[in-house]
Image: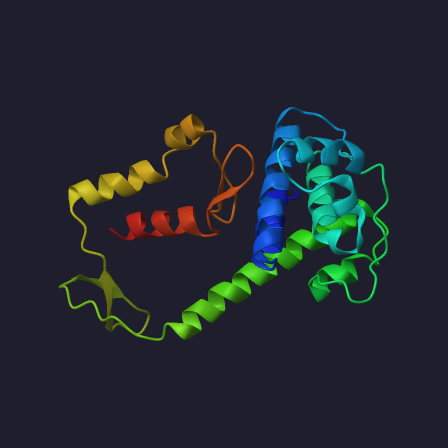
Amino acid sequence: MIDAQAIFEDLKSQASTRQAKSLSVLNAVLKVQHAAGDRNFSIAEIARLSAQKGGPSAQTIRNKTGLVFRQLIEAWAAQAGASMKAPINPLAKGNRVPKDYELLERLSDPAMRAIFGQIIAERNRFRNELNTLKANSELIVDRRPVQRVELPVESGAVQLVQAPSLNDMEVEALKAAIADKFFEYREWTVSAAGQVKDENMREIYKHGYVNAIKKVLKEI
């Protein structure tokens, strides 16, 4: 499933302040177009709607520096199962776009470009998170008392494993956070990997969220 919102966030993070503002307006237009079930994602139509909201015009989208806008339109079109009627112009030298997205232009299939665009966006997000973790190397030691659970091991010895110390209110809060009724009410979905997405398939909680809570509840 193409996640156009993730691609938008990645493109915006690498854009200039002015271009990021235009991307935000264009993304809002595309989101409404997708929600309405409209399959017309041609540059002419999207640019017309965008211009009405103060976003990039058709000329801006089609020119050399408009590749990021075309990538975003293409991503939303692919998510809607549609395609852009107007072809994307080849990338010219001197165009200020990320190198990864420059390579995408070599793929002729729009759906494949959108898929790999999402992969690039996720890769960049994980890399940014890793860099943030590296930059914040300060360790905080939690000295609160914890319960200790004795587990038998094959050698006959006893292995001591720390278990979280939670009261009844905290346990109930964790259960409610991953309850099926709660997800149904919110119209959220949960993947096998424990990732939670909203009704528009945007990530709410990362991979492992639900599974991690289930493991904690199982231990206590």
Q: Which colour scheme appears in the figure?
A: rainbow
Residue at (69%, 63%) from the top-left corner? 98
The answer to whether residue 83 is seen in the rendering is no
Vertically, is 172 above or below 150? above
Return the x and y of residue 123 as percentages of the image width and height.
Answer: 60, 61
Q: Nearer the viewer, residue 140 or 70?
A: 70
Residue 30 in view? yes
Q: Position of residue 85 (x, y in %)?
A: 85, 36
Total numbered badges shown on the rendered structure: 0
Q: Is residue 201 left or right of residue 206?
A: right
Give percent across and percent down for residue 137.
36, 75
Establish if 198 lies above or below 206. Answer: above
Residue drawn 65% across the image and 56% down it: 119
Query: Residue at left 31%, top 49%?
Result: 218
Q: Quadrant of residue 144?
A: bottom left
Q: State the quadrant of the N terminus.
A: top right
Q: Is residue 11 above or below residue 61?
A: below
Q: Which is more toward the observer, 201 or 6?
A: 6
**In the shown orientation, is residue 214 left or right of residue 46?**
left
In the image: residue 149, left or right of residue 99: left
Q: Residue furthest left?
A: 145
Q: Nearer the viewer, residue 70 or 62?
A: 62
Q: Is residue 205 above or below residue 144?
A: above
From the top left corner, tell me how far across and down residue 100 is, in percent: 71, 63
Q: Residue at x 69, y 31 (%)?
A: 49
Indicate the quadrant where residue 104 lies. Answer: bottom right
